[in-house]
Amino acid sequence: MTTLIINIQELLQVRENGILKVSGLEMALLPSIKNAYLLIENDLIADFGPMSHCPKINADKSIDATGKVVLPTWCDSHTHLVYAGNRIQEFVDRINGLTYEEIAQRGGGILNSAEKLNATSEDEIFEQSELRLQEVMKLGTGAIEIKSGYGLTVEGELKMLRVIQRLKQKYPIAIKATFLGAHAFPAKFKENHSGYIDLIINEMLPAIAKEKLADFIDAFLETGYFSVEETEKIMEAGKKYELLPKIHVNQFTAIEGIKACVKHNALSVDHLEIATDDDIQALKNSDTMPVALPSCSYFISIPYTPARKMMNAGLPLALATDYNPGTTPSGNMNFVVATACIKMKMTPEEAINAATINGAYAMGVSETHGSITKGKNANIIITKPIHSYYQLPYEFGSNLIEQVFINGNILE
């Protein structure tokens, strides 16, 4: 099956040589071809270039993209898409003045989601979650990471990870699973942190490894949640099962967690709303990708990740949604890109790089996703007719996507 897309107004994120990520000043450079073509063979990108070099072939399908922009699908490297129910009441509580910490102390937050999840069947959780997955795919997401972390029991965590596995099996989108048993301390372990960490290490991890349910391991490294020392224990335990760390850190406080994550070769450190000069220094010359979650900052009114400071220091940066029922009930990567431009003062080029190639790196799929490169998966977005790709963040409330291809096939 061959698909030839012709007369593309502008083809974005074209990379002749596959790269894994872009950093610092390179973030501002978004290679593109105007008046371009793109050839897809089966599920892969086969060729691309200016229309003057377009091959004369009888493709099975031909698409005229006059006036339209084509770019790789978004790579959303941080989500909690699998959950049960909602936390609408907490949304109203925040409007009425309660903080994230106050809601959590009242039994809300993560513990609220855990109670709902453990009372809901696996089939029902799957049905709720696949509706969310279908929606984000239509919004242009072509690779996604999904975490557990609302079980906080052996069976609850396994249930979540089995749902993620079922989504992997049913849908063509690339899905990576992250074990986040260390999301919060259950009520019965509130005064017995070591007991819960023993449960994670000695019961949850072996059961998850036996069924091969996870690719990564995560922890909420934050004041009032998991300390640096506790998180290091969890990262060390994950390594025994070949689970790379991807860690929540510096959302509310800076407690030298980033330094610890870099020491343990974390693939990514996510949130970073609070980032000190020492944190930025720790990330320099490391293989760890900083990940910003701007729609979380937007929704719960906390600071935004200091993107400009990080990029000026030569760091890479990825963008992701943090899709979850409590602090970011949206998986719309288009809104994330727009918010990064509007609130974090990232240029459209920087934001698109962060949401494509760097997002792919932050979930370990940049060899197959995140750029228009020969041999990569044919996961692409075709926009509606637009004046410029700047319109994508500019018209932040509009859906400017006309078609999404996943593995060479148009999403219906």
Image (cartoon, helix red, strand yellow):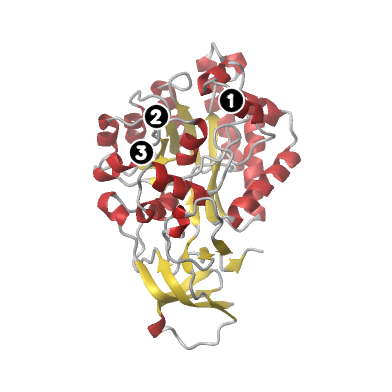
Residue where numbered disc 1 is placed: 109
Residue where numbered disc 2 is placed: 250
Residue where numbered disc 3 is placed: 265
- Return the residue nearer the eye: 260 or 305: 305
**Residue 139, percent from left and from top:** 57, 55
**Residue 263, percent from left and from top:** 32, 33
Q: Earlier in the sequence, mark 2 or mark 1?
A: 1
The answer to the question of whether label 2 and label 3 lie on touching residues, with beta carbons closer than 8 A, is: no
Q: Earlier in the sequence, mark 1 or mark 3?
A: 1
Q: Residue at coordinates 35% horizontally, 69% vertically from top-left? A: 16
**Which type of secondary structure does the marked residue at label 2 adopt?**
loop
Q: Is residue 25 above or below residue 64?
A: above
> What is the three-letter code of the residue carrying label 2?
Asn
**Residue 261, percent from left and from top:** 37, 33
Whether residue 340 is visible here, answered yes or no, is yes
**Which type of secondary structure does the marked residue at label 3 adopt?**
loop
**Which type of secondary structure does the marked residue at label 1 adopt?**
loop
Real-space Cα separation, disc 1 to disc 3, in angstroms = 29 Å
Instruction: Decide if residue 259 is on the left or right side of residue 48.
Output: left
Q: On the rendered image, what quadrant is the N terminus found in?
A: bottom right
Q: Residue at coordinates 57% horizontally, 23% vertically from top-left? A: 199
Name which quarter of the figure residue 287 lies in: top left
Real-space Cα separation, disc 2 to disc 3, in angstroms = 17 Å
Name which quarter of the figure residue 114 lies in: top right
